[in-house]
Image: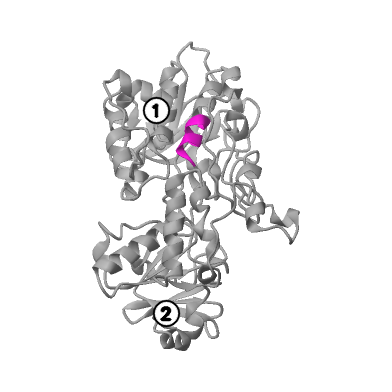
């Protein structure tokens, strides 16, 4: 990377979320020049989309050390370390002061959408001398196309604006794009900003992660306040209890409590459950939607007014076509990171700290950090991202010893996922014994048997329960 002019290295940081701003703080602390490009009109643009959602981590795990040093120097009073902020509180009490009251304010460019990244004078095919040339970053703002040069690039753009589709095969379901006005992705604010959209409506939520669970819980609460609100959980798998998590065994207590509360709602029949529901078709049905699983003529279906798709996210690489990337073929993350986070083989949510070595790309000086570094993997802690950028920035600064050093002890998440160790232990192993973090919350008889309640609406109605309307 060029430093022959004895000038500070310039590091372009893509994204002004928690991890991007942390990267900028570390760059500044190392005597280098950060340039933060944020596509949104304000820092934390993605966080603003889930401002109503409480974090699973308390403030103790939500603040980067280099960022904290900048804030303290500016007279900042830190929040109580044991309290759990919402996204809105994370913005108001941490990200916005960091971006406006510290020296970082002179290094952030908002409304600056990065459109491409490449090497100055080199297309992707050219190799000889490539590593000695700066990066070219092109971005679009209100004035038109802009361009800057940088010695290194940290892509912390996240994945929030690239949600996975409803289709079970990873592709949009047939008709999904045509029904966008009745489909929301991620975590809509059903108790606040989006209340009118969902109150007294029939709403299906697709997904089995924490985003889906949180939305389902909020919809049940909405139904208590707005009679006529009906909630259907569309689950691709056949075991609802897997979504209940570790309960009291979860080292992130707020997440364990969420799973326990959700388990009770399902057990009590407050949520209509459709298991094994692999969405293939979405079509108009009057003013609502007909959501089908299987073939359009012979499969199952439900009819709803609104659909929330909470099936996770995927990284966007379109603007990186001229950067040489090495990615795991399944997870779409740096290959060295894949075995640590692949939910198909990694049974516990705990991931050891990692940094520049694991995140390095074939393009020298280019790194992924934050949620995007996890590709399609679902679980990520901000504290992990802070350790990532500390190590990456040390590597860029030439401090290889600090880059290789681990300066963080992450909390154990206490959640088991994927196939887990039970397959290796044999059929006789119990769930509790197989759970490497203490086992999942025990399933009650009702929850373990919760299946496709729409499979037999007649039985449901005979028992005094609501059918799903198949």
Q: Which residue is mark 2?
A: 468
Q: Residue at x 41, y 37 (%)?
A: 15
Is residue 385 shown in magenta?
Answer: yes
Q: Secondary structure at mark 2?
A: loop
Q: Position of residue 289 (x, y in %)?
A: 38, 76
Query: Is residue 378 rendered to the left or right of residue 191?
Result: right
One can see residue 198 in this view: no
* Residue 419 image-quadrant placement: bottom right
Q: Quadrant of the C terminus?
A: bottom left
Is residue 62 shown in magenta?
Answer: no
Q: Toward the viewer: 164 or 325?
A: 164
Q: Toward the viewer: 195 or 223?
A: 223
Disc 2 crowd rating (10 Å Cα; few below 14, some 14-19, many 20+) is: many
Q: Residue at x 53, y 21 (%)?
A: 394
Query: Is residue 107 rendered to the left or right of residue 156?
Result: left
Q: Position of residue 52 (x, y in %)?
A: 31, 50
Q: Is residue 418 above or below residue 179?
A: above
Q: Is residue 468 above or below residue 86?
A: below
Which stretch appears magenta? 381-388
Q: Toward the viewer: 149 or 435?
A: 435
Query: Is residue 111 rendered to the left or right of residue 318?
Result: left
Q: Toward the viewer: 75 or 420?
A: 420
Q: Secondary structure at mark 1?
A: strand
Q: Position of residue 305 (x, y in %)?
A: 34, 74
Q: Which residue is mark 1?
A: 35
The dominant secondary structure in magenta is helix
Q: Position of residue 124 (x, y in %)?
A: 59, 38
Disc ID at residue 20: none
Q: Quadrant of the N terminus?
A: top right
């Amino acid at each position: 990377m060029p430093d022959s002019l004895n000038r500070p290295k310039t590091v372009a940081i893509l994204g002004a979320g928690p991890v991007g701003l942390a990267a900028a703080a570390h760059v500044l602390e190392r005597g280098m020049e950060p340039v933060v490009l944020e596509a949104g009109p304000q820092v934390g643009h993605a966080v603003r989309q889930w401002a109503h959602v409480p974090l699973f981590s308390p403030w103790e795990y939500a603040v980067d050390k280099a960022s904290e040093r900048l804030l303290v120097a500016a007279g900042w009073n830190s929040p109580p370390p044991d309290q759990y902020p919402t996204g809105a509180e994370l913005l108001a009490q941490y990200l916005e002061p960091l971006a406006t009251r510290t020296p970082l304010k002179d290094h952030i460019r908002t409304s600056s959408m990065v459109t491409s990244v490449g090497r100055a004078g080199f297309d992707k095919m050219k190799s000889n001398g490539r590593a000695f040339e700066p990066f070219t970053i092109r971005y679009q703002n209100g004035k038109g196309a802009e361009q800057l040069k940088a010695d290194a690039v940290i892509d912390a753009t996240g994945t929030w604006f690239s949600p996975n589709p409803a289709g079970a095969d990873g592709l949009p379901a047939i008709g999904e794009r045509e029904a966008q006005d009745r489909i929301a992705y991620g975590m809509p604010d059903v108790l606040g900003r989006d209340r009118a959209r969902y109150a007294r409506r029939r709403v299906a939520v697709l997904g089995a992660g924490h985003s889906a669970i949180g939305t389902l819980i909020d919809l049940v609460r909405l139904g208590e306040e707005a009679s006529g609100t009906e909630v259907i959980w569309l689950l691709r798998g056949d075991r609802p209890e897997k979504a209940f998590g570790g309960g009291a065994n979860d080292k992130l207590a707020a997440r364990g409590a969420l799973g326990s509360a959700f388990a009770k709602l399902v057990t009590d029949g407050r949520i209509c459950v459709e298991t094994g529901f692999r969405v293939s078709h979405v079509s108009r049905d009057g003013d609502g939607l007909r959501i089908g699983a299987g073939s359009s003529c012979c499969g199952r279906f439900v009819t709803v007014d609104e659909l929330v798709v909470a099936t996770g996210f995927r990284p966007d690489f379109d603007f990186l076509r001229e950067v040489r990337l090495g990615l795991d073929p399944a997870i779409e993350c740096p290959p060295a990171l894949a075995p640590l986070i692949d939910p198909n083989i990694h049974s516990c949510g705990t991931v050891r700290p990692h940094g520049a070595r694991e995140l390095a790309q074939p393009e020298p000086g280019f790194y992924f950090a934050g949620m995007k570094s996890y590709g399609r993997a679902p679980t990520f802690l901000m504290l992990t991202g802070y350790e990532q950028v500390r190590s990456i920035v040390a590597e860029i600064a030439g401090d290889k010893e600090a880059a290789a050093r681990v300066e963080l002890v992450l909390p154990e998440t206490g959640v088991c996922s994927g196939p887990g160790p039970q397959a290796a232990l044999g059929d006789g192993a119990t769930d509790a014994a197989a759970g490497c973090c203490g086992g999942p919350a025990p399933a009650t008889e009702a929850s373990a048997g919760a299946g496709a309640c729409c499979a037999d609406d007649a039985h449901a109605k005979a028992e005094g329960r609501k059918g799903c309307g198949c």
